[in-house]
Image: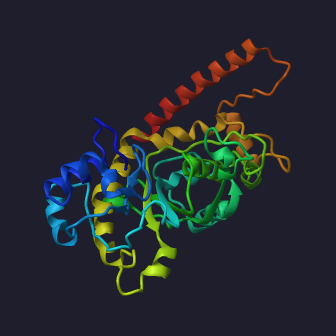
């Protein structure tokens, strides 16, 4: 959700649809700041938005023209509803929190001692264990290791996570080939790559490549190598305006910013246009399956309290792992070792692709 000249974006489609239905002027379209246009959150390429909110000042009510606007939009972009707000309302600055979701195959939780297969089915014990790992992120913490270019002592490195949990397994899109789960995280705000790295490290813990203590250590000052999960499956689920609703939602003049009336239509849209893209792409390209093979290449930094689990050691004996902390090795020796590991890893991935197709 942003505007880049010459690039097709959701924001560009929306503004054009508003112009084509005479709800905004040409000047508003060319210079959105003239109507105080603002989006609650920016979403990058490959990140979907389920309940994105935008705010703007407009003369004519959009409410009566929602159907007309949607006729000017592609089928995978929809205007679901509108609410009247205060004159000074700003969807970005008035937003209290944002909820993101991450749709991923349940096989990412396969114990490292077992062969990862696309037909894996996660039981309640596995989900409960993973939720225990995710609970370690809840609260106010320093997430400088979960983004780029952020130092530990910067105030902006501290973020508030209100909850993070994993759903029960299910089969989206009327298919039974691959089981999925949804991880939802609600926070005040997020930095670039933060959610993908939070999920990446949590998966590494679940599979035995790291321990729960690594999550605690990642929030300390020392640098830590944190894996970043694929972007496929990440979506902006909802934006929250709790403080605004408490102050203005019941004053009789303004609408509370709540979307219960639209929830059914939103869920239908999500299951028709968003989930199928994630599921079909994973089945075809195996981005998550292939990414799992890279977990053994991360160092995760030193763990001061305990060694890796026996399961992790077993996996490391099967997959190439590069130790770059040996001061006795020359730079060239390390480079050769890394190159050999990458070559071996590539062969393992190709072999795995063949195995999962059969």
At x 71%, y 28%, the residue is: 322
Placement of 167 over or under 308, stated as above or below = below
Placement of 13 over or under 90, stated as above or below = above
Residue 43 seen in the figure: yes
Q: Nearer the viewer, residue 309 or 167?
A: 167
At x 70%, y 58%, the residue is: 141
The x, y position of residue 313, in whole percent, is 74, 41
The x, y position of residue 317, in whole percent, is 71, 35
At x 29%, y 70%, the residue is: 82
Placement of 250 over or under 148, stated as above or below = below
In the image, taking residue 189 as reference, residue 358 lies left or right, namely left
The x, y position of residue 9, in whole percent, is 30, 45
Q: Nearer the viewer, residue 21 or 116?
A: 21
Q: Nearer the viewer, residue 66 or 305?
A: 66
In the image, taking residue 158 as reference, residue 87 lies left or right, namely left
Q: How many marks?
A: 0
Residue positioned most to the top = 332
Specify the color scheme: rainbow
The x, y position of residue 19, in whole percent, is 18, 53
At x 34%, y 52%, the residue is: 33
Q: Nearer the viewer, residue 106 or 66?
A: 66
Residue 74 seen in the figure: no
In the image, taking residue 250 as reference, residue 271 lies left or right, namely left
Placement of 153 over or under 6, stated as above or below = below
Quadrant where the C terminus sits is top left
Which corner quadrant of the image does residue 139 belong to? Answer: bottom right
Which corner quadrant of the image does residue 248 belong to? Answer: bottom left
In the image, taking residue 189 as reference, residue 317 lies left or right, namely right
């Amino acid at each position: 959700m942003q505007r880049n000249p010459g690039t097709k974006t959701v924001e560009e489609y929306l503004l054009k649809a508003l112009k084509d239905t005479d709800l905004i002027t040409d000047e508003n379209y060319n210079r959105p700041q003239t109507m105080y246009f603002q989006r609650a959150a920016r979403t990058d390429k490959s990140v979907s938005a389920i309940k994105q909110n935008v705010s703007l000042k407009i003369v004519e009510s959009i409410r009566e023209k929602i159907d007309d606007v949607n006729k000017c939009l592609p089928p995978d972009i929809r205007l679901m509803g509108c609410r009247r707000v205060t004159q000074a309302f700003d969807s970005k600055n008035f937003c209290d929190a944002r909820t993101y979701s991450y749709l991923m195959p349940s096989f990412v939780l396969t114990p490292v001692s077992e062969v990862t297969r696309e037909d894996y089915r996660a039981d309640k014990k596995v989900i409960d264990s993973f939720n225990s790992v995710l609970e370690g992120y809840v609260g106010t913490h320093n997430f400088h290791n979960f983004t780029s270019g952020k130092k530990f002592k910067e105030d902006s490195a501290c973020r508030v996570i209100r909850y993070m949990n994993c759903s029960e397994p299910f089969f989206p899109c009327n298919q039974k080939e691959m089981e999925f789960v949804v991880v939802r995280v609600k926070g005040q705000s997020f930095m670039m790559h933060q959610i993908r790295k939070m999920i990446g490290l949590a998966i590494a813990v679940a599979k035995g490549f790291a321990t729960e203590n690594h999550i605690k250590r990642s929030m300390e000052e020392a640098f830590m190598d944190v894996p970043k999960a694929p972007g496929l499956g990440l979506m902006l689920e909802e934006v929250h305006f709790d403080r605004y609703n408490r102050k203005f939602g019941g004053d009789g003049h303004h609408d509370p910013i709540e979307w219960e009336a639209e929830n059914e239509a939103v869920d239908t849209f999500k299951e028709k246009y968003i989930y199928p893209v994630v599921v079909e792409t994973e089945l075809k390209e195996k981005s998550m399956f292939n990414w799992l093979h890279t977990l053994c290449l991360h160092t995760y930094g030193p763990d001061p309290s305990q060694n890796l689990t026996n399961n992790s050691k077993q996996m490391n004996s099967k997959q190439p792992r590069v130790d770059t902390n040996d001061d006795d090795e020359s730079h060239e020796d390390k480079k050769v070792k890394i190159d050999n590991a990458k070559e071996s890893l590539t062969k393992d991935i190709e072999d795995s692709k063949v195995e999962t197709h059969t």
